[in-house]
């Protein structure tokens, strides 16, 4: 069965991996994924494959969690949203979790690593690909953490696991379509845009959660007394259908 130890073994074995040539985003991990680009999400994808989350030995298949491509993820916001949609993202770190960093505290997922161990003072150590162009072992505090994502190691869900599909909904509110935030695209984003447009907000309804949609969502959240993070989760989704139009 896939295990956190298996994923972390990959990280430890490849600590210090850099890029050839330096600054090119090219190495064994990006070559495996299929293109040269920022490779932090590719790194955790490869580690999950190595741990056993695979159907062929060379792809990424995580039960209950969709992936962007057959090799997992290359874009951190998509990775976070996919784990959120599966009910597997919270603020409780465990070894083997994927840790999502938000450098600017703006609600945007900027970087991802894998938790190695958690210290008694609440700080933690993580392995992070593409940190200073190298896979590094880093000591972190939680001030820059947006969320911890929990792969289903050993087929055991975390204690707080509640699949999105069974979250109770308020009468008159359509079923929650899944988290969306800056950088996401698709049906959930379009539904949010269309509902906000119906309420009178000036917003494009193109299914792309760009800067304009992020601004409108944050203004709506502030107006309704919600957490102003630009993330449309269950609370914001419910509010756009039930809150008084002002």
Image (spheres, helix red, strand yellow):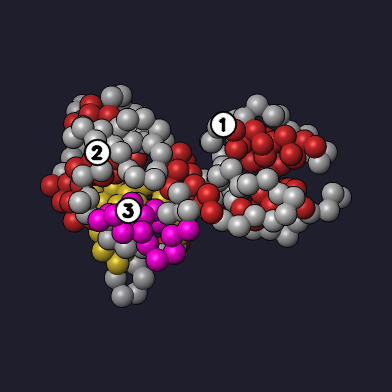
Corner quadrant of residue 110 = top left
Give the structural element (helix, strand or loop) at label 2. loop
Residue 152: which numbered mark, if any?
Answer: 3
Image x and y of residue 56, in percent = 21, 32
Q: CA distance from mark 2 to mark 3?
A: 13 Å
| Residue stretch rendered in magenta on the structure | 148-162
Q: SS for tag 1?
A: loop
What residue is at 40 percent from the left and 66 percent from the top? 159
Identify which residue is drawn at 20% across, 51% down.
1
From this viewpoint, is residue 165 visible?
yes
In the picture, measured across the screen, residue 211 lies left or right of residue 153, that is: right
Q: Position of 156 compared to 147: left or right? A: left
Rendering quarter of residue 139: bottom left
Nearest to N terminus: mark 2 or mark 3: 2
79 relative to 242 in the view: left or right: left
For label 1, the residue is 186
- The foreground one among 34 and 242 is 242
User: At 59% from the left edge and 43% from the top edge, which residue is drawn?
Assistant: 177
Label 3: how many Cα within 10 Å (few below 14, some 14–19, many 20+): many
Residue 54: numbered disc: 2
Circles 3 and 1: CB atoms closer than 8 Å: no
Q: Is residue 223 visible?
A: no
Which of 236/55 is in front? 55
Closer to us: mark 2 or mark 1? Answer: 2
State if disc 3 and disc 2 touch (CB < 8 Å): no
Per the image, label 3 sits on a secondary structure element best described as loop
Q: Position of residue 134 (x, y in %)?
A: 24, 41
């Amino acid at each position: 069965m896939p295990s956190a130890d298996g994923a972390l073994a990959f990280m430890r074995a490849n600590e210090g991996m850099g890029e050839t040539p330096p600054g090119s985003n090219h190495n064994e991990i990006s070559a495996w994924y299929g293109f040269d680009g920022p490779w932090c999400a590719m790194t955790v994808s490869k580690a999950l494959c190595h741990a056993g989350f695979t159907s062929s030995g060379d792809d990424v298949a995580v039960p209950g969690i969709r992936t962007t491509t057959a090799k997992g993820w290359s874009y951190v916001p998509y990775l976070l949203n996919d784990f959120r949609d599966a009910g597997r993202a919270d603020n409780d770190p465990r070894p083997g979790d994927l840790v999502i960093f938000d450098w600017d505290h703006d609600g945007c997922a900027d970087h991802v690593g894998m938790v190695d161990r958690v210290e008694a003072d609440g700080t933690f150590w993580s392995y992070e690909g593409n940190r200073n162009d190298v896979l590094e072992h880093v000591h972190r505090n939680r001030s820059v953490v947006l969320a911890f994502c929990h792969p289903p190691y050993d087929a055991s869900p975390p204690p707080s696991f509640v699949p999105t599909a069974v979250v109770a909904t308020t009468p008159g509110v359509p079923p929650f379509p899944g988290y969306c935030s800056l950088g996401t695209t698709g049906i959930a984003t379009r539904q949010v845009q269309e509902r906000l447009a119906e309420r009178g907000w000036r917003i494009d309804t193109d299914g792309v959660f760009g800067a304009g949609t992020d601004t409108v969502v944050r203004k709506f959240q502030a107006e309704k007394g919600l957490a102003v993070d630009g993330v449309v989760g269950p609370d914001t989704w419910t509010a756009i259908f039930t809150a008084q139009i002002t």
